[in-house]
Image (tube, rainbow, N blue to C red):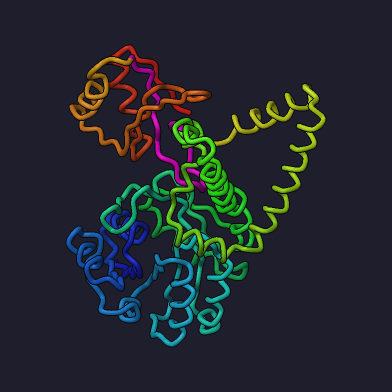
Amino acid sequence: MKRNIAIIGLGLIGGSLGLAMKRNPDLYITGFDRSYKTADEAYRRGIIDMIAPSAESACEQADFVFFATPVNTTVSMMKEARNWGFKENVIITDTGSTKFPIMEAAKELEDRGIVVIGGHPMAGSHKSGVSAAKAHLFENAYYILTPREATDSSKVESLKDILASTKGKVVVLEAEQHDRMTAIVSHFPHIVASSMVGLLAKQEAGQPFVKNLAAGGFRDLTRIASADPIMWRDITIQNRDELLHQLDGWMKEMENVRSMLTSNEPERIFDFFAEAKQYRDHLPSTKEGAVQGALYMPFDLHIDVPDHPGVISEITKILADERISLTNIRIVETRTDVYGILVVSFQTAEDRKKARQVLSKATDYSMHII
């Protein structure tokens, strides 16, 4: 039996959801986006089966509604939707990175007997928009669901069934728990990375060459500071309380670091770095078989190559001959604590694994995954 899906917002996430769910032939997808150009591209790419003239009309016959819009937009639309007509057993969900404000906005819909289950696929890309949508975006990434405690478990299972075609790892959490944990591992690190970049920018005038040295490990460490500032402005506002709590903890930790530097005790300094290394080395990574975490990270392959003409074209030709797509390639000039002079980025762990295999057969270069 065909089930009707409505996707509101057809950017990277909404478009990728559509492509992933098209793997299931029993789903009929109606899409809406405020940009008709975006909606038309989604239709032409086969992401959706029909373009709706409005968000409300997209939802009228839907068994499942996905709000794949920014959190502020989703909150506003949830409030508008209290006056919309829905099918009797509809399940509404979203893809926002903060859950508490969305679940608060959903209360009036729930008062009507409508089931709302918060959702957050923890996946992303260095690109945005429907043109960047891909079916495998959510594969091996955590997909968090935040139902109410009183939500019928069969409804959660129904949504899990719909999401099976994304090949994501579905996990159920409380909304507050989700927001606290994403503040720790995603939202607050963005603030730290951006502040580190800001500190570098302020000191560049007195030390002009420092920008060149930042092209190595510093650039990798602060990669996430290149994210969309509008999106991160909104996330920071939405998860303000949790971020303030994290900031308090960070400032306390920095006071401990200052005390460590002031005392200048070798053993204490060693323990600081050793304990961090031990814990960090046991964190999940993007190595083969690992589940993608809260922060988007590309699948990098670090290659030790000799400095001779044509070495990059040699590698790209090998990959092209095997029809392996790469997303980025760069030479690392400042290589303190960095493995490999050449870093090649791939869209999936499978692409990286295949690239490593074919390069190992064709060359004797040393390769690392970190």
**Residue closest to the far top:** 364
Vertical order, 182 against 255 (above or below): below
State the image coordinates of residue 299 (x, y, percent, origin top left).
40, 36
Residue 325 as seen in the image, left or right of residue 65: left
Q: How many marks?
A: 0
State the image coordinates of residue 38 (x, y, percent, origin top left).
25, 65
Vertical order, 104 against 83 (above or below): above
Q: Is residue 303 magenta?
A: yes
Vertical order, 142 against 107 (above or below): above
The residue located at (44%, 48%) in the rendering is 226
| Residue 289 appearing in the image | no
Q: Quadrant of the N terminus?
A: bottom left
- Tell me where residue 282 sits by quadrant: top right
- Tell me where residue 27 sits by quadrant: bottom left
Dominant secondary structure, magenta:
loop
State the image coordinates of residue 125 (x, y, percent, origin top left).
38, 48
- Depth check: give the residue in front, 168 or 246: 246
The residue located at (64%, 28%) in the rendering is 277
Stretch of the chain drawn in magenta: 285-306
Residue 5 as seen in the image, left or right of residue 225: left
The residue located at (76%, 43%) in the rendering is 255
| Residue 145 appearing in the image | yes
Q: Is residue 292 magenta?
A: yes
Residue 163 as seen in the image, left or right of residue 189: left
The residue located at (56%, 56%) in the rendering is 172
**Residue closest to the far front:** 206
- Depth check: give the residue in front, 332 or 71: 332
Residue 106 as seen in the image, left or right of residue 301: right
